[in-house]
Amino acid sequence: MLRRKEKMGFHGGFNLLDTYPLKFCNIIEEIQSDRTPEKFEFHFPDQKIRHVIVNLCPTEPWALPNWVVLGHKTTAFLDKLYEMKTRYFPEASVSIAINKRETEFVAKAIGYANAADWIKIYTLDPKYPQDDPVMFAKVILGLDINFGQNITTQGIFIFDAQTLLAIYDTCILKNTVNSRLITLSGSGLKENEIVRVRLGTSIDTLLQHRTQEAIKYNIFVNGPLRGREITDISQKIDWSVNNIVVLKDQDSKVIFPMLKSDELAFTTNILGEPRQCVYCNFCDNICPVELEPALYYHSYIRGEKHKARLYHLEKCIECGLCSFICPSKLELLRINKECKALDRKT
Ligand code: SF4
Ligand code: SF4
């Protein structure tokens, strides 16, 4: 059964895939671990699984593309999914969220679903952050969940294709899974690559001979928008690492930043001296949960953090789009997180 939701969904968001298309070299090299390889493990919960959403709609250019995992084996993938459903979540609804532009996957999945009443296909506009759990739950299930909430306690599971196949290999075939595919990309690297990495390999080992020489750079695990910046490169790769982005450190001043929003957008650097809000409203328009980041910013700089907390700040899904789009490079997400943390302390 096919559901099209590309015109539904949410306001705001941003199509990162169009604006910053990334090309990866197709050679997938196996990176050996410098430590004892770790194993992927998964245990199905005792509680009933009510909804399963399979995420085939990555929205970030640095995310692992579908073709790497699925290749031309969409039907075999769906057969495995059916075997897992039958065994582990027989009563759950199963929804596949697919980027509507990936026409080969869409056609195969629709052809499959036409003969299977257990699966629904949702062809979605891949604007960021469509694949955030909060947005998936809203668009596909019609449920409002809170950011940071453990949705598995509500019987909702969201899997990417690689994780589903790892669960299949581990739980059904009883194979050992001790490596995963990840992407390496960004202006601080010599080239963008997709590599297979043994779990437990350090990020240091992974980046050896891959970063550009004689530059300063910042390293992000799972992207510069909703991932985290790391400084300890002895950290190891575990199953939660989908990608590593290395960005050149840029700290030179930019004159008239409001005229250079395109140029400034793809950086998390503050770029020179602190600036003023120019009231452009870019941040308000792009917010996918209809918040007003500029309002929080102005409350914050007036020293009125408590006021920022009055305007539904708890709905912020920490997607980072407001900081990303701000031509003054104001650290809006950091301010949001600081104000949200006050709620947890008081
Ligand atoms: S980080 Fe929060 S406030 Fe900023 S755009 Fe995303 S949801 Fe909106
Ligand atoms: S995007 Fe930045 S400069 Fe524009 S209104 Fe928001 S905070 Fe102000």
Image (cartoon, rainbow, N blue to C red):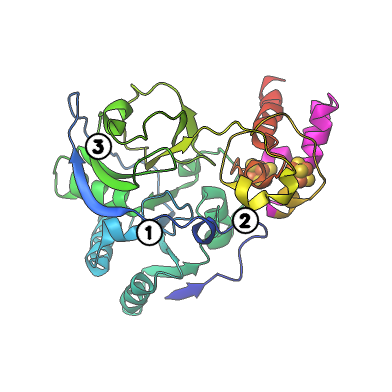
Q: Residues within 10 Å of mark 1 (few under 14, many from 20)?
A: few
Image quarter where ligand 1 lies: top right
Name the spot of residue 213 as percent of width and height, x first: 36, 31
Up/down of 30 relative to 58, above or below: above
The quarter of the picture where residue 182 lies is top left
Up/down of 304 relative to 263, above or below: above
Disc 1 Cβ-to-ligand 1 distance below 8 Å: no
Name the spot of residue 34 as percent of width and height, x first: 19, 25
Apparent side of residue 69 relative to residue 138 in the rendered image (left or right): left
Q: Earlier in the sequence, mark 2 or mark 1?
A: 2
Up/down of 303 relative to 105, above or below: above
Q: Which element carries disc 3, helix, strand or loop?
A: loop
Answer whether residue 291 is visible to the viewer in this image.
no
Q: CA distance from mark 2 to mark 1?
A: 33 Å
- Residue 26 is labelled as none
Q: Which residue is mark 3?
A: 40
**Residue drawn at point x = 55 percent, y = 54 percent:** 128
The kind of residue on which mark 2 rests is: Gly
Q: Which residue is mark 1?
A: 91
Q: Which residue is mark 2?
A: 13
Badge nearest the viewer, 3 or 2 = 2
Q: Earlier in the sequence, mark 3 or mark 1?
A: 3
| Quadrant (top left, top right, bottom left, bottom right) of the C terminus | top right
**Residue drawn at point x = 61 percent, y = 68 percent:** 8
The kind of residue on which mark 3 rests is: Phe
Name the spot of residue 307 as percent of width and height, x first: 83, 31
